[in-house]
Structure formats: structure tokens, C-alpha cells
Amino acid sequence: MRNSKTFSIVAHTTLITLAVLEIYPILIMAFISGKNYYQVVTNPLMPSLPFHLENFAKAWRLGIRWYMLNSITVTLAILCGSMFLSCIAAYVFARHDFPGKGFLFSLLLGLLVIPGITTLVPRYVLVRDLQLLNSLWAVILPGVLGANAFNIFVLRTFFASLPEELFEAARLDGAGHWTIFTRVTMPLSWAIVSALAVLQIIGAWNDYIWPVMVLNRDSIQTIAIGLVYLTGSPAAPEIGVQMAGSVIASIPMIVLFFLAMRTFIEGLATGAIKI
Amino acid sequence: MLQERELGRTAVVGIKTSPATAVRKHSLWLRIWKNRTLYLLIAPVFFGAGLFQYYPALTALYRSFYAWDGRRAHFVGLDNFEFFLTDPRLLISWVNVSKLLIFHLIVVMTLPVLVAYLIYRLRDEGQRYRYRVLFVLPIVVPGFVNIVLWKWFYSLNGVINFLLRGVGLESWTRVWLGDPDTALYALMFMGFPWVGGITMLIYLAGFLTIPMEVLDAAIVDGATGLKRFWLVEMPFLRGQLKLQVILTFIGTIQGFQAPLIMTRGGPGYATMVPGLRMYDAAMVDFKLGYASSIGVILFIVIFTLTLINQRFIRGGQEYDEA
């Protein structure tokens, strides 16, 4: 069927208006990051010359560089560790039978019911008792070990849908678990694994509440804590420097967007991620 | 399934030691031993789930009956839950979170649906893709950056007041987050027009599953415009809507990142939410037992609302078959 001319015009106008309203605040952030105080007060909505790129240097020197390094470390560690464990567990549950499988899987199912807020305080005490406070391990270990249920579910469903003949053939050729996992399962699941990886990266990079509870020492804080502190403290630098810090904090996500978004959008749109 | 039943039987019969069951029992252990590699492969996940999920959850339940400062604890029965009913900060926080919840539910069921629908109705595949990218773009801004940005928008010399002065509404300007009358609404308005991101993509995926034959049949039957939208296309979105409603429940009721960063629950208790009250009870007042009891109540609330939602909002499944 064809759309009427009026419908077309209304649709495009609505979409473009909403897109502009949605994206404009991001542009304002970018504009402000190049302004001094006077430019901000007189013209916050449009770029103005000259650009004060020294804002970025100032933010960088105010500790953003260490915060970024810490965040990158934490995010990569969580991503690799958690995806590795989730993929292996999902492979085991999807392609093998063993005594107690149903019970063990329902134990994982139960995790989806427990909200993060309920476990927050006791987990803090646990991490304190494990002597992990004020080390990056306090963020990495719970991230790698404690939050795999969702990934395992999605991956298990996908692995289970792969044709059994492939696995049969590999087994006949004498392939062990590791070979089947790396040579058969993973190459066929690249799209779904990368879509989950994107979600995992966004989640780890954006995390604020847990890191701010367990990381008090300035030198090991993540960018989320560092930026919020930088913008909220009484000795906060001027707004241009704050926004420069915000732009720097977003750069890894922008890179990720251009690297992975096509896969990610198509993965979601075609329903590769069954939720 | 069959295997589980077998397991159960073995466990029950195993008490009597007849030779036949001894063999079966032996074979169960043998099967477990044979699969030892598999158990080893999934062991880290279960170790982590036990240590960082189940153990803290049980601790929360257990300690909610104690006065606990994180080191010493003594049993106080239901005192925490009693205090819970009289704590003024907590009572206000329930009112606030209800308002936020109603607002978020309305938003999640309207604007992203509209955007997804309009994109779905575009004829051109290239246009569709470009709009999709445009509306997903805002996720490049991390949540905490967005909060910091809007906090500045709301400040005295921020963008909101600048715009108001620009159109001559000088008298309306204020410190939006510092005014008890506007702080909570400012939190709601953050992220306007609330259409960017993954929610919209999930809706769009739902619309794209509508089979061409169904649409053709509906059009032949004369379903056009709003009728087509409500009676033919929207039913296909039920599953996605239901999911988003559940996620909104879960996210809003336990969320407190924005109030923590923007207002710390103030001014007064104007933006206090239960999650933040719990955080303060634990990290500021060191009443970890009381914090645990709030955590347990939040768990019960979320669990109940999810069940109600599952029970009373029908999913898309039966519609597909009909």
C-alpha cells in the first residue's frame, strides 16, 4: 500500500522535530565544551568563536585521564570475563545433557527475580569483608562473576537453535568441547555475541552507584564518579571545562557507536536478541 | 524433563537399599562423573551467582530483622519494618516514586511507540535506516553525563532559564532543582522528548514482524488510518509493550541515580525515593539492618507488580495464533 502525501509530510515533520529535540542537548554539550564563561552566559545554544580547546586540556589534567584509564580497565575486564563465562555456560546448557541440569538452570532463572537494590547493601559488606574496598577488583569481580544470568539466557536460546548436525559432525571428527565451542558455536554466533557485548560495555561504562560505594580513593575512581565529583564539588571548574570532561567521557561510546552500531541495530531489529 | 523425573525417583527410592536401586544410584554417580568437565565449565558462573547474588539476597532478608551497623548485630524482630512505617523521609519517597512511575509508564507507552510506528510506515528502506540511526544516537551519551548535563540545564544560568528570558518570561526563571515545587518535575522532564534509544528499536522490531498478508487483508476489509493502527497493527506490539512496562516498573522503583547525583533527595525531601533512602540509611546513617529491610520491601513490591503485570496484561502470543 502507498502512504498518502499528507501522511508522508506529517510523518517526516514529526520524526525530524523529535530527532532534533532529542539530539540538540548533545550538541549543546559539545558547543559549551569549547566556550569560556562569558560565551556560555551570552550564547549557550550555538557555537561561538574562538573555540577554547584548552578546556579539554584542563579537564584532562584535572584527573579525567586517570578516571578514563580506570574505566577502560574495568569495562574491558568485565566485558572479557563475563562474556567468556556466559558463552561457555550457555554452550553447556544448550548442547549437553547432564544430571541436575534442570535444577541448575532454574537457579540461574531465579537470579532474574532478585533486584539489584536488594543485594546492594549486603554485597557492599561482603566486598568490604573480602578486603576489596578501594581496589578496582571491587567493581570487576562482581561484574564478571555476579551478573551473567541475562547473557546466558539469550545465548542459550540462540545456541540451542543451531542445527545439531554440525555438532554431530564435529564430534564424529573427534573434536572436544573446546574445539566445538571455538570452531563451531562461536563463529555462528558472532552477531548475537557482539550485540550482547555492546550492552555489556554500555552497562559497565555507565555504572555509577556501585563504584561510588566501593571506590573512595581518588586515584582509582572511574569516569562516572570522577566526572560527577568534578561537576558537583564546591571547587568545580567552570562549566566549559565540565562539559569538556563530559565530552571526553562520551568518546568511547561514540567510537563504539560507529564500530558496532550497524550490527547492533540490525541484531535488535531482526529479533536476534529474543527478550 | 524426563531426566529430572528420573533424578527425583532415584533420590526417593535410594533410601531403601535394594540391589536394583543400588545399580541405578551407582549409574547416577557414574553419569555425574562422566560429565565432570561440564560441571567444571559452569562452576565459575554458579560460584559467582552464589557469592554475589544469592548470599547477599539471603543476608538482606536475614539482617532485615536485626539492628546492624555492618559489624555488630542484634536481633530486633520487626522493629525495622515498624520504623519503616513511621519514617517520614521514606513515606514521602513512596509518594515521589509513584509519581515518577506513573509518568515513566505513560511516556514509555506513547512517544517511542509513535516514533517506531512512523518509521515503520516509511516506504523507503534507506530512510528507515537513517531515522533508526538518528534515534539510537543519544545512547552515545552515558547516563551519568546526561544527568550532569541536565543538572546544568536546570541551574540559574542554565539553558532552561536562558530560553525563558529569551521569550520574555523572566519571572518564571528559577533554580529548577532547588525549588521544592519543581524539583521532582524537573527530574521527570530530564531527557525530553524521551524517544531515543533501545526502547524505540524494540517497538520497531515488533512492528516489522507484522506479516504482509495480514495488512493486505485488513486493507481489503477497509481498515485505514486509526482503525488500522489500533485494530490491526497495535496488537502485534503487545509483547514488546508488556516487556517495556515490566522494565519500567523494575527500573523506576529501584532507581535512584538521578536523585543521588542531581538533588540528593532535596530540597527537603522533595525528590527522595526509596532507593536513595536505603542508600542513605546504609552509607550515611550506618543503619544497615534498616537498609536491608527497605531492600526486602522493594523486592516484594517489584515482584508483586511484575506478577500482576504478567497476569493481567495479555501478551502478544495468543494474538498471533488467533
Image (cartoon, coloured by chain):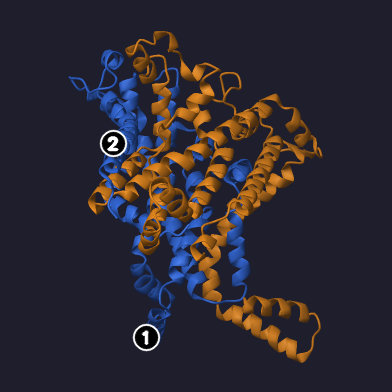
* Crowding near the residue tagged with mark 1, few <14, some 14–19, many ≥20 C-alpha atoms within 10 Å: few
* Crowding near the residue tagged with mark 2, few <14, some 14–19, many ≥20 C-alpha atoms within 10 Å: few
Which quadrant of the structure image shows residue B286?
Answer: top right
| Of the image marks 2 and 1, the number of the one nearer the N terminus | 2
**Could you tell me which chain the residue with mark 1 belongs to?**
A
Which quadrant of the structure image shows residue B114?
Answer: top left
Q: Residue furthest bottom?
A: B19
Q: CA distance from mark 2 to mark 1?
A: 59 Å
**Could you tell me which chain the residue with mark 2 belongs to?**
A
Q: Residue at x 60, y 35 (%)?
A: B275
Identity, as a three-letter code, of the amino acid under mark 1: Asp
Give the labeled residue for mark 1: A173
Q: Which chain is orange?
A: B
Q: How many marks?
A: 2
Q: Residue at x 43, y 53 (%)?
A: B233
> Which quadrant, please, contains the N terminus of chain B?
bottom right
Give the labeled residue for mark 2: A13
Identity, as a three-letter code, of the amino acid under mark 2: Thr
Q: Residue at x 41, y 26 (%)?
A: B150
Q: Position of residue B284 (x, y in %)?
A: 62, 28
Residue B311 vertical placement versus B15 (above, below): above
